[in-house]
Image (cartoon, rainbow, N blue to C red):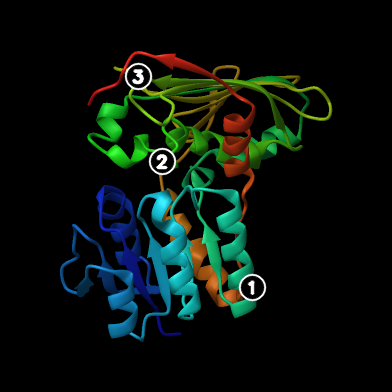
Amino acid sequence: MSPIHLAIVGVGKIARDQHLPSIAKNPDFQLVAAASRHGSVDGIDNFTSIDEMLEKVPGIEAVSLCMPPQHRYDAAYKALNAGKHVFMEKPPGATLSEVEDLQALADRKGLSLFASWHSRYAPAVEATKAFLASTTIRSMKVIWKEDVRHWHPNQEWIWQAGGLGVFDPGINALSIVTHILPKPVFITRATLEFPENRDAPIAADITFTDADGLDLSAEFDWRQTGKQSWDIVADTEAGQMVLSEGGAKLSIDGVLKHEEPEQEYPMLYKRFAEIVKAGKSDVDLAPLRHVADAFMLGRRKFVDAFHD
């Protein structure tokens, strides 16, 4: 079968670090074009807008969208209307409503729409899901703390309304939690800390529960220096479970049970090829819905100004 002719929109850090290497190694795709205001990819046609790209390269079959979420709806809408399958970086959009509209459009057009959650494809996530399904969970705590200056230096869009702030990494944790838990959870309380000079939060403290009264809390913080923390800890009848390093390692009562090399983005492109060939979409909005609920229910606390 011929490879899927793919284009990429938004040639920034995440595209160069993750998307381009994963596409290059996947025989199901051939990268044929790119559109970006500030970047380009060697060896293919490059454009400054998705409109020009879609007009001048009609053979494009699928598009990967790697721009900030505030601008993703317009690009996805244009690609779907042009008959292209669409891969959306996380979060899939700035609002739930716009992603639901895109899903309806993809369904009408008979196209595949993929809301990608890369952390769900971390090496130990499936093993963790299987473990939790085999026991009773007493409580769970999510600790997701990192240094924004290291991971997002001078990226102003992430502090703007719709950029999500600390929920940009926090949604990775939520994508794992909503996948590994046997029952849906919902937010009961949240405190969001906003720097006085920013429109998005730098930290969040959230409490969740489920229909059975699960004790679940999450701490997100973008001010951590030194060792970064991406851990999910659960007290269960079968022992203490620790899913650490963003989903890379699973330990039970201190004993390492699962560890493999990281392959998140290659797995995302494998999944995208699968749904395109099957003629279906993969759009789970549970992680983004929790972020929306946190903004809706959360108490806002203003803290010191943040400067890069």
- Mark 1 falls on what kind of element? helix
Q: Is residue 252 above or below residue 54?
A: above
- Mark 3 falls on what kind of element? loop
- Position of residue 113 measured from the top left corner of the image (x, y, whole percent): 54, 66
User: Of callouts 3 and 1, which one flags the residue occurring earlier in the amino acid sequence?
Assistant: 1
C-alpha distance separating marks 3 and 1: 41 Å
Number of disc labels: 3
Q: Which residue is mark 3?
A: 223
Amino acid at the residue labelled 2: Gly
Local packing at callout 3 (Cα closer than 10 Å; few below 14, some 14-19, many 20+) is some
Q: Please report contact status of discs 3 and 2: CB closer than 8 Å, yes or no.
A: no
- Position of residue 83 measured from the top left corner of the image (x, y, whole percent): 49, 81
Q: What residue sits 47% from the left and 60% below the top?
A: 73
C-alpha distance separating marks 2 and 1: 27 Å
- Position of residue 184 measured from the top left corner of the image (x, y, whole percent): 74, 38
Q: Is residue 287 above or below residue 76?
A: above
Amino acid at the residue labelled 1: Asp
User: Of callouts 3 and 2, which one flags the residue occurring earlier in the amino acid sequence?
Assistant: 2
Local packing at callout 1 (Cα closer than 10 Å; few below 14, some 14-19, many 20+) is some
Amino acid at the residue labelled 3: Arg
Q: Which residue is mark 2?
A: 163
Q: What residue sits 26% from the left and 28% below the top?
A: 149
Could you say which quadrant of the image residue 201 lies in? top left
- Mark 2 falls on what kind of element? loop
> Disc 2 or disc 1, which is closer to the eye?
2
Q: What residue sits 68% from the left and 34% below the top?
A: 131
The circle drawn on residue 107 is: 1
The reply to whether residue 64 is in sight is yes
Q: Please report contact status of discs 3 and 1: CB closer than 8 Å, yes or no.
A: no
Left or right placement of residue 284 versus residue 172 in this view = right
- Position of residue 153 measured from the top left corner of the image (x, y, whole percent): 23, 34
Could you say which quadrant of the image residue 297 lies in? top right
